Image: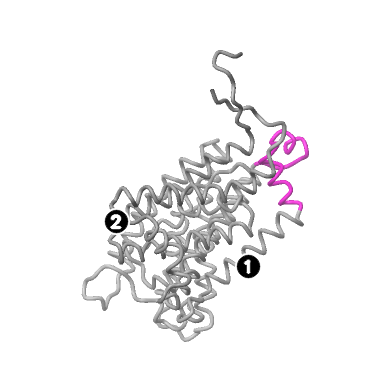
Amino acid sequence: MLSLEKRPQPSRTWTLASPIVAVLLTMIAGAGLFAALGQDPIEALTKIFYEPLFGEFSFFYLPQLLIKGAPLVAIALGLSIGFRAGIWNIGAEGQYIIGALCGAGVALALYPSEARWLVFPAMLLAGALGGFAWAMIPGLLRVRFGTNEILVSLMLVYVAEQLLASMALGLMRNPDGQGFPGSRNMARMDAATSWIDQSNGMHWGVVIALIGVIFVYVLFAKHILGFQIKLAGQAPRAAAFSGVNPARLVLFCLGASGALAGLAGLTEVAGPSGIVSIDFNVGYGFTAIIVAFLGRLHPVGILLAGTLMALTYIGGDVAQSSLGLPGAAIQVFQGMLLFFLLAVDVLTNYRVRLRERGAA
């Protein structure tokens, strides 16, 4: 019979190999899923992974990698800071929504504006502060009352979704929209758009994500705060004895992840999405959790994982339109990635042993 034996030290080989193995297992299981749905599994996987990169219409799909990947990378970077310290922010989707609402609120309040050069910087600041403030709710509740930040941050997602619906139908609704829900299109407002080069998919969200990769890398590689974050996650008692302030660490980690999620929301609503609508949020905050772990909580790994996950979004759309695959099947396929990653990750800390039945 098979049993698990704890390793004296985590395996470095499996730490690096588990994301690759998880991707391969996901492709195998996904092929089985597509076959069960009556599709050619090889063709389905080709549509998802090959067609957007090398297919006939790759010139159209490649810019979408930047559009889909930027918010995933930015949010996952913020989450990785907390996850490394053992602080679990599961509510990035809510912080993403609030950041978008705050930034869009500034744009709509100033429309039309004479001081055009001030509008977008003010939107960026409002988006970051909005996400930061929403993340501070579970942060302060944990520090002050010892509440569980997982539950509080997750429940606040549903509050944020109700606020989004209320704004799209009420205060932010386009007065010239003939009664339809949704705000003015900020992508068409020169002073309020996050687009840099729309034809190539380049917008300020991409720039923020790349700056975030550099910032988080420097934080963990060069700064004492990054060392304290890693120490708090790996050895909490040692961190306490070394003088790490746990309350300050909680607030910093949640605040940083909230601000990055808020910026991702703002650049999305001011660019690729364009409007505040009821269905503005598409689950980036939850998918970013997969991206963070698939990237091993390392900024460069997160950049690569975000690109891969963006590819599954784009390829999933291609497979749906060309093969008639249901959207739920693509979501299951993406979910398999986290499932297999967590399953294979067990081998990082445990080795599989074959023992005779009845042996002690």
Residue 325: x percent and y percent? 30, 58
x then y, percent, for residue 186: 40, 76
The label on residue 16 is none
Instruction: Say which of 302 and 274 sits in front.
Output: 302
Q: Give the x, y percent position of residue 164.
A: 35, 59
Rendered image quadrant of residue 125: bottom right
Tell me the amino acid under the disc marked 2.
Pro
Residue position for label 2: 326
Q: Name which of mark 1 and mark 2 comes first in the sequence.
A: 1
Measured Cα–Cα span from mark 1 to mark 2: 36 Å
Secondary structure beneath dot 1 equals: helix
| Secondary structure mostly taken by the magenta-highlighted segment of the chain | helix
Q: What element does badge 2 sit on?
A: loop
Q: Which of the 4 image quadrants contains residue 208? A: bottom right
Residue denoted by label 1:
211
The residue depicted at 72 percent of the width and 31 percent of the height is 8
Query: As displayed, is residue 77 above or below residue 153?
Result: below
72 vs 345: above or below: below
The range drawn in magenta is 224-246
Residue 236 is covered by the magenta coloring:
yes
Please name the amino acid that badge 1 sits on.
Ile
Q: Mark 2, residues whose alpha carbon is within 10 Å: few (<14), some, or many (≥20)?
A: some
Q: How is the image coloured?
A: one colour
**Could you classify mark 1 by the number of other residues whose Cα lies within 10 Å: few (under 14), some (14-19), or many (20 or more)?**
few
Asked if 58 appears above or below 1 in the picture, the reply is below
Question: Could you tell me which residue is drawn at 72 percent across and 35 percent down?
Answer: 9
Judge from the rendering whether residue 12 lies leftward or rightward of residue 33; answer left or right.
Answer: right
From the top left corner, tell me how far across and down residue 37 is, in percent: 29, 51
